Image (cartoon, rainbow, N blue to C red):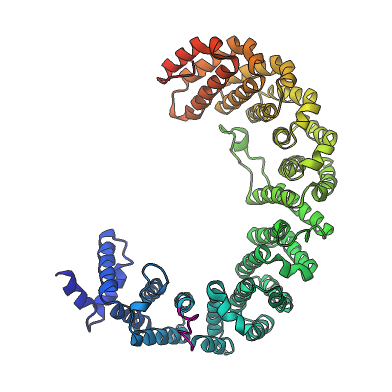
């Protein structure tokens, strides 16, 4: 049967072939689905009116929910204003039929997921035709729905209001007074969680579409009711709804933080209370933290707003520090073969790290350092290794944002870290080395210039920790960080000790330790330049041996780092010294090398 004959059957009087076509569009068989897509596209090009009317008819009569849902999705795609937008090609009677069917189905559809798809379809079409008054009955219908006694109709209307606020908010602005009334009534009086979330979404989207600050201020009195949506969901044990509410409020904090400024104390206080509630799910608490950190980051739109709440900053910092305590002493961490193995770390730990970094960058050292200093002192005085570890990790996280203030307190900062090099727990020693590495980057070159005589010997000593290869490898990595911000004059007196230690590490069986030693050697050579010549004859044989022996797939990274280190060492000592080895290395890797 040719395509035209197939088309006649599909769009004929018998509805079954069209239903079959739609079901085939959802088929797991690529061949069946591709054939159905080709036929659907022919329908779209040659019979757009019949196609749209058939899809609308399916919405009304089909007994299969999946097929009805697919019909709603396909109709939305056809009515979305993009390259395949076919509304202008449809005749006036088809326009009327589709609009009538969509509004009717919103009233009679009982399945919530399908109701939402219908709302999406209505919103897409309305965003195209409402500005030209192409659907005059829609807004009266929506106001009628929100005023009805049906939670399902109320939810549908708010879902459409939310999307229209995003797409064509200026069309809704003339109804600002009526919208304020229905939003306030729903958020204050409605007891249905789905309706309240839909209303909250609509309110927040509408506030964002308002260009006038005076218009936005008219909605200030809704904020307590908006927050009540969140607290009611939590009190009712409905954390899924609470998380939806939090995500919407985070969006508001990001785009319109000034809207919150008059009631900031109450709002932030509530969020911190949620963040501190250990009975709640992690996801809920993390979202509450995200809200407050997002507000802190809103420097351009609301400068200094969070800085005016020092008690909240201290409280938030304490919450983030407690998240860093959620770490286990997993055996896999100690026996790891790679440096980035994070065994024992949890989602709480990851959120704590990320948010401390963001908070410090957004609020700066003058605000964060006094708070951090007080809490670090308490943590470092505690017996638990986790608290020492948390303080060191937190210090590394805030270093970038607080660098100017921390440079002024270098003695205190460096002493705090170096004192932890001798802690009995290897994860604490690792965290101290990690902090030194980060501080070398963020506080350099001040740290290198003033404290090289304390830091470099401490790192060299840490390389002797043969019981803990991860500590050794990280000490080598920290040498890299330190030397990148270092002059040859500072580094040269320490080269004998550092290079000899790194050569020992190169002979270590752990690939992770060898890789750390290679990157450190490369950095030291690059920083010391011609001063590295005296070590060349001792170092190069080890580097060539590693390159030749690292042939397994598992050794790809080791081989790459060996080649990189040889190249950097060669550039540091110069062509004359390196020429013979360059030819030899080039032959062994079957590639031209620096010579």
Instruction: Give the x, y percent position of residue 110.
Output: 46, 82
Magenta span of residues: 129-136
Q: Residue 145 is drawn in which quadrant?
A: bottom right
Q: Residue 285 is drawn in which quadrant?
A: bottom right
Where is 186 relative to 384, above or below? below
**Nearest the eye: 130 or 104:** 130
Where is 176 relative to 366, above or below? below
**Nearest the eye: 171 or 581:** 171
Query: Residue at the spot x=63%, y=69% of the render?
Result: 245
Query: Residue at the spot x=15%, y=69% of the render?
Result: 2
Q: Main secondary structure of the magenta part?
A: loop
**Nearest the eye: 282 or 533:** 533
- The answer to whether 195 appears left or right of 404 in the picture is left
Query: Residue at the spot x=75%, y=54% of the render?
Result: 319
Residue 135 colored magenta?
yes
Instruction: Give the x, y percent position of residue 23.
Output: 31, 71
Where is 547 relative to 361, above or below? above
Specify whether residue 202 is in view: yes
- Name, please, the residue furthest toward the left: 1
- The answer to whether 363 appears left or right of 52 in the picture is right
Specify whether residue 507 is in view: no
Residue 574 colored magenta?
no
Q: Residue 28 is drawn in which quadrant?
A: bottom left
Quadrant of the drawing holding the N terminus: bottom left
The mark total stands at 0
- The answer to whether 68 appears left or right of 429 in the picture is left
């Amino acid at each position: 049967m040719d395509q035209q004959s197939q088309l006649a059957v599909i769009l004929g009087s018998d509805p079954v072939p069209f239903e079959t076509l739609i079901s085939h569009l959802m088929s797991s068989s690529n061949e069946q689905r591709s054939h159905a897509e080709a036929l659907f596209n022919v329908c779209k090009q040659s019979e757009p009116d019949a196609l749209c009317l058939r899809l609308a008819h399916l919405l009304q009569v089909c007994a299969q929910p999946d097929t009805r849902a697919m019909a709603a999705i396909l109709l939305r795609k056809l009515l979305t204003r993009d390259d395949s937008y076919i509304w202008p090609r449809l005749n006036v009677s088809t326009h009327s039929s589709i609009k009538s069917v969509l509004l009717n189905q919103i009233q009679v559809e009982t399945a919530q997921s399908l109701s939402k798809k219908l709302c999406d379809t209505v919103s897409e079409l309305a965003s195209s035709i409402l500005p030209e008054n192409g659907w005059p009955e829609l807004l009266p219908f929506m106001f009628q729905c929100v005023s009805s006694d049906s939670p399902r109709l109320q939810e549908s209307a708010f879902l459409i209001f939310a999307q229209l606020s995003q797409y064509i908010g200026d069309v809704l602005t003339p109804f600002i007074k009526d919208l304020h009334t229905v939003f306030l009534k729903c958020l204050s009086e409605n007891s249905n969680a789905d309706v309240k979330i839909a209303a909250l979404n609509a309110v927040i989207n509408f506030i964002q579409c308002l260009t006038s600050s005076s218009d936005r201020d008219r909605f200030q009195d809704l904020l307590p009711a908006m927050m009540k949506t969140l607290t009611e969901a939590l009190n009712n044990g409905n954390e899924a709804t609470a998380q939806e509410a939090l995500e919407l409020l985070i969006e508001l904090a990001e785009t319109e933080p000034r809207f919150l400024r008059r009631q900031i104390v109450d709002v932030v206080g509530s969020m911190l209370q949620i963040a501190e509630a250990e009975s709640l799910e992690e996801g809920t608490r993390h979202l509450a933290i995200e809200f407050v950190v997002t507000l802190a980051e809103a420097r351009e739109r609301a400068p200094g707003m969070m800085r005016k709440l020092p008690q909240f900053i201290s409280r938030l910092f304490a919450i983030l520090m407690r998240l860093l305590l959620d770490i286990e002493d997993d055996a896999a961490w100690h026996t790891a073969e790679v440096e980035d193995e994070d065994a024992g770390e949890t989602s709480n730990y990851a959120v704590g790290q990320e948010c401390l970094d963001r908070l410090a960058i957004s609020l700066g050292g003058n605000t964060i350092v006094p708070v951090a200093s007080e809490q670090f002192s308490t943590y470092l005085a505690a017996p638990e290794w986790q608290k020492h570890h948390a303080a060191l990790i937190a210090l590394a996280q805030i270093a970038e944002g607080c660098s100017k203030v921390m440079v002024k307190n270098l003695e205190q900062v460096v002493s705090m870290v170096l004192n932890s090099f001798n802690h009995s727990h290897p994860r604490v020693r690792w965290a101290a080395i990690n902090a030194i590495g980060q501080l070398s980057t963020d506080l350099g070159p001040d740290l290198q210039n003033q404290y090289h005589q304390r830091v470099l010997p401490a790192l060299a000593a840490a390389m002797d920790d043969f019981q803990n290869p991860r500590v050794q490898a990280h000490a080598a990595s920290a040498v890299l960080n330190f030397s990148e911000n270092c002059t040859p004059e500072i580094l040269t007196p320490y080269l004998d000790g550092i290079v000899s230690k790194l050569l020992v590490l190169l002979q270590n069986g752990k690939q992770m330790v060898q890789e750390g030693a290679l990157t450190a050697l490369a950095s030291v050579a690059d920083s010391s330049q011609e001063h590295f010549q005296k070590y060349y004859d001792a170092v190069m044989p080890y580097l060539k041996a590693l390159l030749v022996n690292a042939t397994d797939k598992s050794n790809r990274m080791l081989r790459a780092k060996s080649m990189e280190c040889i190249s950097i060492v060669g550039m540091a000592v110069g062509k004359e010294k390196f020429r013979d080895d360059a030819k030899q290395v080039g032959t062994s890797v079957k590639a031209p090398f620096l010579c």
